[in-house]
Image (spheres, rainbow, N blue to C red):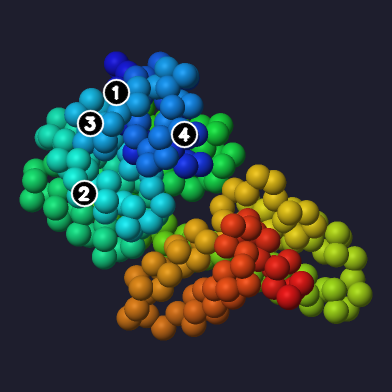
């Protein structure tokens, strides 16, 4: 399959890793970032830096938006010189930021009105996944379109999931981040119980990594004994995602989600917004 021209709007942890891996695999890469110096650093690698999100859409076949939140996403899609002002029916447009359901549905409707091809493909896998090309892609949208671009997506992914109609990738991502954050808080509570009983915390944590196990338990264990460096996912961003999840679940009795969100909001109020999300247990225990 002929290499695609890739556009990336937003060069944070995820966007930067994606740009690097697409470039390494022979794709032409076009980028825009709010902070121009970050984009200029990529220019030295052979990436083409564009003057606006609209220009990215004019140059690329696939356009990924990987910004921080609803506000930044809305600006780069619908603002002056936004992606939609430069897009045509020839583009495949992809939202890969973690966004609220109200905003993603509004964006979907706008793209449908404009006869534009749009997928929602939020990402999980953290900094390591982005840098190594082993992200998990959580897709919503036309499965036929997804099949066409799968060989291109494999450059940045360990696994590609399809959850159904457009918008369902984002819905899954909010559910996923809620249950991961709940697991993180539960690990801290379990360690607090073990500590109160005078148990060997290293042995307890090693046991928990095996049973129940899983990536999140390992991350929680590592962060419990040493602050993660560099930060892979901040308290600020998981709090944002949990806030979106709470709005998504507004008609559902989800008390556990309320508790988890309150814990992260507490960490935010204590001034730990830029700390790693896995450090929340240590932060709350220390306080």
Residue ID at (49%, 48%): 124
Q: Which residue is mark 4?
A: 38
Q: Position of residue 33 (x, y in %)?
A: 38, 38
Q: Marks 3 and 2, Cα distance to the nearest angstrom? A: 13 Å
Q: Which residue is mark 3?
A: 55
Q: Label 3 crowding class (10 Å Cα cut-off): few <14, some 14-19, many 20+?
A: many
Q: Which residue is mark 1?
A: 5
The answer to whether the residues at label 1 and label 3 have Cβ atoms under 8 Å apart is: no
Q: Marks 4 and 2, Cα distance to the nearest angstrom? A: 21 Å
The answer to whether the residues at label 3 and label 2 have Cβ atoms under 8 Å apart is: no
* Secondary structure category for the residue under label 4: helix
Instruction: Left or right? Give the position of 190 relative to 61.
Output: right
Q: Which residue is mark 2?
A: 79
Q: Label 4 crowding class (10 Å Cα cut-off): few <14, some 14-19, many 20+?
A: some
Q: Marks 1 and 3, Cα distance to the nearest angstrom? A: 13 Å
Residue ID at (34%, 78%): 250
Front residue of 191/50: it is 50
Q: Which mark is residue 147?
A: none
Q: Marks 2 and 1, Cα distance to the nearest angstrom? A: 23 Å
Q: For the N terminus, which image quadrant?
A: top left
Q: Label 1 crowding class (10 Å Cα cut-off): few <14, some 14-19, many 20+?
A: some
Mark 1 vs 3, N-terminal side: 1
Mark 4 vs 3, N-terminal side: 4
The answer to whether the residues at label 4 and label 1 have Cβ atoms under 8 Å apart is: no
């Amino acid at each position: 399959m002929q290499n695609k021209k890739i556009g990336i709007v937003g060069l944070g942890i995820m966007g930067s890793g994606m740009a690097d891996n697409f470039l390494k695999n022979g794709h032409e890469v076009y980028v825009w970032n709010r902070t121009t110096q970050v984009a200029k650093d990529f220019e030295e690698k052979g990436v083409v830096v564009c003057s606006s999100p609209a220009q990215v859409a004019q140059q690329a076949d696939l356009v990924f938006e990987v910004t921080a939140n609803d506000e930044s996403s809305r600006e780069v899609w619908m603002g002056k010189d936004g992606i939609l002002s430069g897009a045509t029916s020839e583009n495949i447009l992809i939202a890969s930021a973690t966004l609220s359901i109200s905003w993603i549905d509004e964006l979907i409707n706008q793209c449908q009105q404009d006869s534009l091809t749009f997928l929602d493909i939020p990402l999980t896998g953290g900094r390591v996944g982005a840098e190594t090309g082993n992200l998990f892609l959580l897709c919503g949208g036309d499965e036929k379109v997804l099949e066409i671009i799968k060989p291109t997506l494999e450059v940045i992914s360990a696994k590609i999931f399809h959850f159904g109609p457009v918008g369902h990738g984002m819905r899954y991502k909010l559910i996923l981040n809620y249950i991961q954050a709940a697991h993180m808080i539960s690990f801290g509570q379990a360690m607090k119980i073990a500590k109160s009983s005078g148990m060997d915390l290293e042995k307890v944590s090693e046991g928990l990594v095996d049973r129940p196990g899983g990536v999140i338990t390992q991350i929680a264990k590592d962060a419990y004994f040493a602050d993660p460096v560099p930060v892979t996912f901040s308290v600020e961003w998981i709090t944002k995602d949990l806030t979106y999840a709470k709005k998504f679940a507004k008609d559902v009795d989800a008390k556990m989600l309320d508790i988890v969100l309150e814990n992260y909001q507490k960490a935010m109020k204590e001034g730990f917004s830029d700390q790693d999300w896995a450090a929340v247990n240590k932060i709350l225990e220390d306080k």
